[in-house]
Image: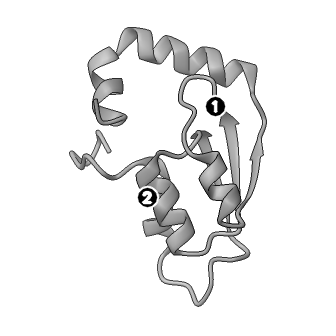
Amino acid sequence: RVQKGDPILHGEMDAIQNAGRQKSYKDVTCYTTLSPCMMCTGTIIQFGIGRVVVAESENFKGFQDVLSLAGVDVKDYHEERCTHMMADFIENNPELWNEDIGE
């Protein structure tokens, strides 16, 4: 997102774009640092991605409940190192973080 100057190119969106066109995404697993935002959640559901693996959801709760309701298998690992890494990033880059989450 930052590297390409694109406000909506979150990691999930970038990964889906890089995966290219597929006949089906149901066997695809999306690995993500944070719980997906509403935009990324909608894209995951729209493309029928079958599984999402989240490293941590303490710093951003996201919309895992919406993914689950749509039939997506969601695994949240609550990875402590990742939680601390993101907390440090947010503390040191509040403007960038607020831009990322749409505030």
Image disc number at residue 44: none
Residue 94 quadrant: top left
Labels 1 and 2: the sequence-earlier one: 2
Counting from the top left corner in percent of width and height, residue 69 is at 68, 60
- Asked whether, in this view, residue 46 is left or right of residue 75, the answer is left
Q: Secondary structure at mark 2?
A: helix
Image disc number at residue 13: 2
**Which three-letter amino acid code belongs to the residue tagged 1?**
Ser
Counting from the top left corner in percent of width and height, residue 32 is at 60, 45
Identified at 63% across, 31% down, the residue is 57
Identified at 62% across, 85% down, the residue is 24
Q: Secondary structure at mark 1?
A: loop
| 30 to 45, vertically: above or below | above
| 41 to 101, vertically: above or below | below
Furthest residue in direction bottom, as rendered:
23
Cα gap from disc 1 to disc 2, whole angstroms: 18 Å
**Which three-letter amino acid code belongs to the residue tagged 2?**
Met
- Asked whether, in this view, residue 22 is left or right of residue 9, the answer is right
| 36 to 24, vertically: above or below | above
- Asked whether, in this view, residue 67 is left or right of residue 11, the answer is right
Disc 1 versus disc 2: nearer the observer: 1
| 89 to 16, vertically: above or below | above
- Asked whether, in this view, residue 66 is left or right of residue 77, the answer is left
The quadrant of the rendering that contains the N terminus is top left
Identified at 31% across, 26% down, the residue is 98
The quadrant of the rendering that contains the C terminus is top left
Counting from the top left corner in percent of width and height, residue 53 is at 71, 49
Q: Please give the residue where the numbered disc 1 appears in the rendered image.
A: 57
Give the number of callouts.
2
